[in-house]
Amino acid sequence: MIDNPYYSHEFHGEYDLVSIGRLDLEEGGSIPDCELAVATFGTLNEAKDNAILIPTWYSGTHQVWRENYIGPDHALNPDKYFIVVVDQIGSGLSTSPHNATGPNAGIAMSRFPHVRIGDDVVAQERLLREHFGIEKLHAVVGGSMGAQQTYEWAVRFPEKVERAAPIAGTAQNTPHDFLFTEVLVEAITSDPGFAGGEYTSNADVVEGLKRHARIWAIMGFSTEFWKQEVWRALEFTSKEAFLEGFLEPYFTAMDPNDLLCMAWKWQRGDVARHTGGDLDAALGRITAKTFVMPISEDMFFPVRDCAAEAAKIKNAELRVIDDVLGHLGLFAVSPTYMPQIDQHLTELFESPV
Amino acid sequence: MIDNPYYSHEFHGEYDLVSIGRLDLEEGGSIPDCELAVATFGTLNEAKDNAILIPTWYSGTHQVWRENYIGPDHALNPDKYFIVVVDQIGSGLSTSPHNATGPNAGIAMSRFPHVRIGDDVVAQERLLREHFGIEKLHAVVGGSMGAQQTYEWAVRFPEKVERAAPIAGTAQNTPHDFLFTEVLVEAITSDPGFAGGEYTSNADVVEGLKRHARIWAIMGFSTEFWKQEVWRALEFTSKEAFLEGFLEPYFTAMDPNDLLCMAWKWQRGDVARHTGGDLDAALGRITAKTFVMPISEDMFFPVRDCAAEAAKIKNAELRVIDDVLGHLGLFAVSPTYMPQIDQHLTELFESPV
């Protein structure tokens, strides 16, 4: 257990911790008492058919959704929908290496077991059913690793997902993505302060976390983001100031083991695990109306990879989000980003199924 | 002085070491006795007007040109042209941090001064003039950092360069490229074995050099290279085997300080240094017939950046090389790569000026 103030209500606003009990994991082992951090918006109607689930991305939590994506002016409108954002296992808010105590003390830090995208989705399904009484989702919406979970939902529980919006992510992680994530992992684990995962503070690993941030700088943003100096719109005066004032503080606040837990999961996201490796068959199971929404300048979830998957889904449309930021367009800082997201999601949410 | 067997005739075939004497550097300081490694092919004619200069790229030497680009079946035909490949300063063959001895002993290893692309070009011009009596070049051809030097030649000595073929590189390094290179630098310098540049063997820095190799894996090759498992054509059975059998041995054989010398140079390549920062004016000085030849899938010298520069050059044409490998298509392993290069270079070399 590491005391890390970043993972708190101060930085992440209101959310609840809900225990779903023991979670047995696909890779073996279990989380004795799996707690999920959950932020909800709006009200579940009597028919319990207005719920939208949002799983979170690598390093992200419900907070970025609250601040940018959810509101009465957005497609994710709490006046109409009951929106449930569930922080993924390893996010630092839900059960994670750094916060494993009490019944989870035996899996703290470097002893945390490998978790898969499928484990998150099983945990979320149990949470929705047992805690909220939700048996069917109006939609699942997620970006990046959230898109991986969205696809996993649509393949694993096709009858429970009416609509799906995977944004900037794939159903089957690509080899390039695997290698990219490995580079992120190595930036952290190569820091002598990492101490095999048994550091005493994330500050011990600050150099590794900074390198990790700077790798994000070259893959998370597009070449054109840097060429056009788009960071100026974010009130920075140099690219160095942007790195030191934005990306580095963003990642150095986080817990290394938590990031590694998510990275391992990300690397192995693959819906074809349900169909003996047959991706066509796996995506063929999806019945949800699906909008596949890559970001135009994404360096590591390129449009063509998403388009190739969309072509394998019966009821899918490719809706490319145009954003010079690239993958980290997900932060929703371009003024033209949310209008596109809202337009597509509104259309999706209002589509008959 | 480090004894590194990689930088030898065994690995780099025939080449000569030619001293051009003391080289004063743009950033201050000097190389007391600058030796350039030079491999030549063909014969200089009496008019001394059939010379083609090839400057080298990051980590590359004349050997990759000898093995793949030069020959009677290629545009770079030694039966017609006198081809001079000059290894850049810091390449490990020319004067470099790891081999600085004798008069250069004072600048060995971590004391090696910063060298700029302009310093290389000044050194090459002196070599060509004083050693070979060459006053004018039929062409300058270079890839990546070799493209940076090609542009520098065409801007600095416009009257000496009749034709220019910058392949997969830019005249002004981009901010994204700067950050990418910084990530490469940090992979090396963060290795405790680097010891501030005073390691006793490159093997001390093997972990850093491996990380450096794996960063190349995700930026040097395209997402599609990995998706299509193009490494199978290179007789590897898995992407891991390709990394361990190709990229890692390639880079771990090299000297860390030498790579850092080249990286610093690469980051700061900018022909606009001649014109007070005005890139249009700098490129406007080019009189050479220029074929700007980006590689279609290049992740960090994208086609659009090269196209934007081509548009600023009076006598330039954009000739995109289609290659799924991306930047490291420069290794010339795609069967479709050299035919494209040869076609464009033949046309360029035969163009009237």
Image: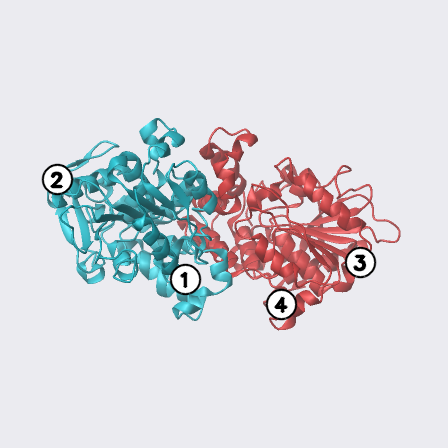
Chain colours: A cyan, B red
Q: Name the residue under label 1.
A: A336
Disc 3 sits on a residue from what chain? B
Q: Do labels 4 and 3 share a chain?
A: yes
The amino acid type of the residue labelled 1 equals Thr
From this viewpoint, which residue is outermost toward the front?
A352
**Quadrant of the rendering where the C terminus of chain B is positioned:** bottom right
Residue A21 is tagged as 2
Q: Which amino acid does label 2 sit on?
A: Gly
Amino acid type at mark 4 = Leu
**Residue carrying label 4:** B279
Question: Vertically, is A6 above or below A89?
Answer: below
Name the residue beneath numbered marker 3.
B136
Q: Is residue A212 left or right of residue B142?
A: left
Q: How far apart are marks 4 and 3 (CA)?
A: 24 Å
How far is mark 4 from mark 1, CA to CA?
A: 30 Å
Q: Which of pointers 3 and 2 indicates the residue nearer the eye?
A: 2
Front-most of A169 and A84? Answer: A84
**Residue A232 rendering spot, x and y as whole percentages:** 43, 69
What is the residue that sits farthest to the top in this orientation? A276
Label 3: which secondary element: loop
| Mark 1, other Cα within 10 Å: few <14 / some 14–19 / many ≥20 | few
Q: Tell me what residue is drawn at x 35 percent, y 43 percent.
A: A290
Q: What element carries label 4?
A: helix
In the rendered image, residues at marks 3 and 1 fall on the same chain: no
Q: Which of marks 2 and 1 is in front?
A: 1
The chain to which mark 2 is attached is A
Visible residue check, residue B4: yes
Given the image, on which type of amino acid does mark 3 rest?
Lys
Question: Do pointers 3 and 2 mark residues of a single chain?
Answer: no
Of the numbered discs 4 and 3, the one sitting upstream in the chain is 3
